Image: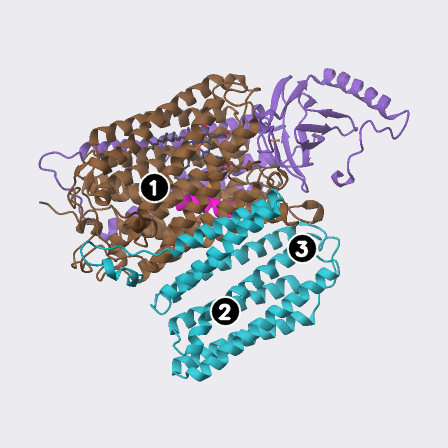
Amino acid sequence: MKGKRMHDTIKRAAAGLAALFLTVPAWAAGGAKAAAATPDPARDWDLLWNEVIFDITIIGILFAIVTAWFIWQARRRPGNEVGASVPLSPASAVGWVVIPIFVFLSIDLYTAANGWVLWNTFRDVPANRMEIKLEAGMYSWDYTYPNGVRTQNELVVPAGTPIVLRMTSRDTLHSHYIPDFRVKEDSMPGRITYLWFNPTKPGEHIVTCAEYCGVMHGYMAGRIIVKAPEEYAAWMKGEETRLAALTAPEPAPAAKPAKPAAKKT
Amino acid sequence: MNLKEWIFTTDHKRVGVLYLIGSIAAFAVAGIMALLMRAELSTIGPTITANPTQYNVWLYTHGAVMILGFQIPALTGFFANYCIPLMIGAKDVAFPRVNALSVWLFYVGVILALLTFFIPDPPDVMWTGYPPYSTITTGNTAMYSFTVLILGFASIIGGVNFLTTVAYMRAPGITLNKLNIFVWCTLAAFVLQLIFVPVLGTAVSLISMDKYLGTNFFDPTKGGDVLTYQNLFWFYSHPAVYVIFLPFIGVVYEIIAAHAKNMVFNYKMVVYGGVGGIVLLAGEVWVHHLYVSGMADWLRIGQMVTTLMISIPVGLMMIGLIGTLYKGSIAFTTPMLYALGVVFLFLIGGLTGIPLAVPSLTIGVSDTYYVVGHFHYVMAVAGTFAIFGGVYHWFPKMTGKMYNEFWGKLGFWITFVGVNIVFWIMMDVGVKGMPRRYYDYAHFPQFEGAHQWMTVGAAILAVGFTIAILNWILGAINGKPAGDNPWGSPSLEWTTVSPPPHGNWPSPPSVSEDWHPYGFKKG
Amino acid sequence: MAHDAHHAEAHGHAHWDTSIYPFIISFGILALAVAFSFKFVYHNSFAAILSMGIGFPLIIAGIAGWTSEAMGKGEGLSYGAMGWFILAEAMIFVSFFVSYWYTKLHVDVWPPAGNIELPRIMPLVMTFILVASSLTIHYAEHLLHLGNKGGFKTWYLITIVLGACFLGMSVYEWSHLIHQGFTISTNAFSTIFFSVTGLHGSHVVVGLAIFLAGLPSVLRGDVDEGFMRTAGLYWHFVDIIWFFVVSQVYYW
Ligand code: HEA
Ligand code: HEA
Ligand code: CUA
Ligand SMILES: [Cu+2]
């Protein structure tokens, strides 16, 4: 990735600025870079999320404590019927603009740099991926494997292989959301979008629709079933034979209509 | 009292009061929609309606009416109308008739929105109205478009009116650096409205044209593009959140300065850094609502930085607010409680916007209840508290009478507890994966308990708001006389009698050299 | 302002200004919005016509009453206000152009299927006419400023005629294109073409309506200079927008 070196530099610079104000836990800062082999966006997401939540909690508590302290100090008491603040000197008036800007900006840039790194993890698809096409529609998820096998609302994948979904929609907007993998991206007619996730170990995960798409939006759900590679191979074998049985005898039975040509990508 | 002089009035104060009545009514209706939604969500599966469309219609009305019928009109309609001419020492606005037109167009817009409950095939497009759903639904999308168009138009002519008023009708001696913070904030909000509402108007017109007049803006088979709409919509609707934020934080400034009897901290920083900074940045961040909608990557990354940078001017405004408390003389009146509530609750809401600003994090939580929690904290909680506090603050001016402090404070504390139950839990279930706009969450049974707590919280806060509204009604009828300046504020609106007569002052007020709206004096 | 009607009751208690027309116009607009739903959503033309029959008279009566109530009372700030209003108007056009660019630049093939050759000469003539009308109104204002009411009247009328010519040519062109089967629903480009030229045309109509609203007082000879300046400003705006329309939808 060509941007990599540049944003590492930016990140280092921003981190330097931010350190003036906040000591950010080192484990979190290193998180995004640590993964060497296939990255795991879900885990990186958790790390960065926790870090940012930690930062904003600190900022919030600081502001809240100061506010509470001022309120307590300045409550109306005898002898204190009118506020006693004095106008700022020009220097401190400017200082109260420049210093906060500097501090806030460094926090912002630091957060942005971390976010950028994670963004690349989410968008740079690993080379050893499996490509699956997804057509969303009211109200189902229709997957097509590279070998032509199709499933609906159930995506079976081998553990350890990154999965890329190339998505489009046949009617309204939908959003393929897998909470366990922290990914979602909308699909829509006329454009192809993608997302990828890394199913590390066997298990089942919910897929749910995260973009309002119509009356039954809340019911538009499916499952990602992660199988151990051997089990997956066996399952795929079965599907392939079924597909062959369906398509071999007569080439054009009306069982399943061919997909429109527009979705060749 | 002469009813005709109220309905056909062109006086800015009465127009303002008409705005207040209309927007609080809209709030009550939309609030009841929220309660119905909460009731429906309290169990898995159908609870009070078996028809998802019914729920979607509630949600649509709730969102659209709360934003377009309650907060924007209450802030840029009621407060702007009531306060701006009084604060700048003018006897009315520049175009009183246009002002009357804008309030009645507002009513017409709200009537259209509420017709939803009486027409067949009501609109169910959510307040965002995204195509292609909005162009293929059997629901009445035209109703949505016209509601937005008319309310938008009302707001544009209001904006033209107030910008002209403040530019040309300030009393002698009121220089730009002696305008109330609220006036600055509202002017900025109007500038945003003028620039961005037309874009929204275009966006919603296009969906109705596509649906009913056969155009192809969003039809990819004819060369159109569905994402065009989302860009246009958020190009307005993000600045719209600052159209809400700016005036409400302005109201909070007025309340805090008056009830702490203290000079606003670093006035120029607040005005030029805070308000000015927000206006400059507001238009460059809309893509943060499209982080997961398939936008070009470079736009998502670029606007991450601008979105994060919004924390700078907003942070300056927070510093100004908190600084105004320092060495003040704080009276814990009802308006002050609401205003202090805003300081804390807006911190929660604003800071939870920071993770949302980072696209890679948004991938995990966009379109979940986390987002719903974020914007209820900033808007539904901080915004509504500011509005309620503001109404309490200017209540003696409007009616000449005093509300009841005890019930006022009680209402505040009940609401305070309620909102935190509802909206805190919301953010929590959101991070765990609860998507928004779900009539039913059958495949997330683990969230049922949380949803029940939210329903309980909503019931609690409804009690609090109802107490506040009743307190106003009863106070207006038989409150104790309040006097002209109960808070002892030097701001100009307190120098006339309560309630002010037509024309506001017998003769235009003139201010001395060392006068300042926040120059509180001993004695 | 609206004082006059109330002189009778002005004694005793303080009186409050009122005007009934904003209220009337607003509800006229409500009736039109409802009419749209009747026609296009519920396919009930009768109810649609009925509510248009309520809406239009209300709006026209409202505007007429309003102008007669306010005209000549010199709400002298309208020039400044028009500037803000034009900012808002300009943003509508910006939205359309941006939608256009966004759509066009993102696809590989443009224009989409179904397009025809647009005329090339006609838009130039139209541009010429509109620019001329901008100059004539400017000249008219200049004469008015010098106090030459007769000259003002002539050039004012010429401007109206030029504006009307422009509109006529637009109508001619539209019907010509529609005849060739190029309609607003042909494809995304035709959609943009008709909506942008239509939107601009509607602004020409509004500009002409403002001129016509001022016409009686011009003929009577008691023109309000502020009103004329404001109307002229709007007309220049309509003119400038046309440059964008022409360059973007005809020649690019
Ligand atoms: C009044 C309304 C209001 C306000 C003020 C804000 C303020 C902010 N909002 Fe929010 N937002 C909404 C109303 C509002 N929002 C609504 C209605 C939606 C959802 C619409 C829908 O989809 O239906 C939404 C959605 C929304 C999203 C899209 C989420 C999604 O759909 O995926 C994002 C993403 O970036 C976002 C971010 C922000 C940010 C960064 C701010 C910032 O302005 C906040 C700035 C404030 C602070 C940061 C706190 C104070 C500052 C300091 C204490 C200084 C120090 C702090 C730092 C340096 C970090 N908001
Ligand atoms: C300013 C805006 C605003 C305000 C104030 C509120 C207030 C509330 N909102 Fe809402 N909300 C939105 C703006 C707002 N909301 C938006 C924009 C959406 C997104 C819509 C979309 O997805 O398209 C949303 C969505 C939304 C959802 C998400 C639903 C979903 O995604 O499926 C929920 C769920 O609980 C909710 C709840 C509430 C609750 C409980 C309140 C409570 O605070 C309400 C409290 C108020 C009352 C209960 C009324 C009290 C008054 C009376 C009872 C009248 C008394 C009268 C007399 C005495 C005369 N809101
Ligand atoms: Cu599909 Cu929501
Ligand atoms: Cu936003």
Q: Are the two marked residues, 1 and 3, in contact with CB atoms closer than 8 angstroms?
A: no
Q: Which residue is mark 2?
A: C235
Quadrant housing the C terminus of chain C: bottom right
Q: Are the two marked residues, 2 and 1, in contact with CB atoms closer than 8 angstroms?
A: no
Real-space Cα separation, disc 2 to disc 3, in angstroms: 27 Å
Q: Secondary structure at mark 3?
A: loop
Residue positioned most to the right = A249
Q: Kindly identify the amino acid type of the residue bearing the numbered disc 3.
A: Ile
Which chain is in purple here?
A
Where residue C116 appears, x then y in whole percent?
Answer: 74, 60
Examine the structure image and report whether residue B87 is included in the region drawn in magenta. no
State left or right for residue B174 relative to residue B233: left
> What shade does chain C have?
cyan
Mark 2 vs 3, N-terminal side: 3
* Within-10-Å neighbours for mark 2: few <14, some 14–19, many 20+: many
Q: Which residue is mark 1?
A: B21
Identified at 32% across, 54% down, the residue is B10
Real-space Cα separation, disc 1 to disc 3, in angstroms: 43 Å
The total number of labels drawn is: 3
- Which chain is disc 3 placed on? C
Which chain is in brown here?
B
Magenta-highlighted residues: B234-243
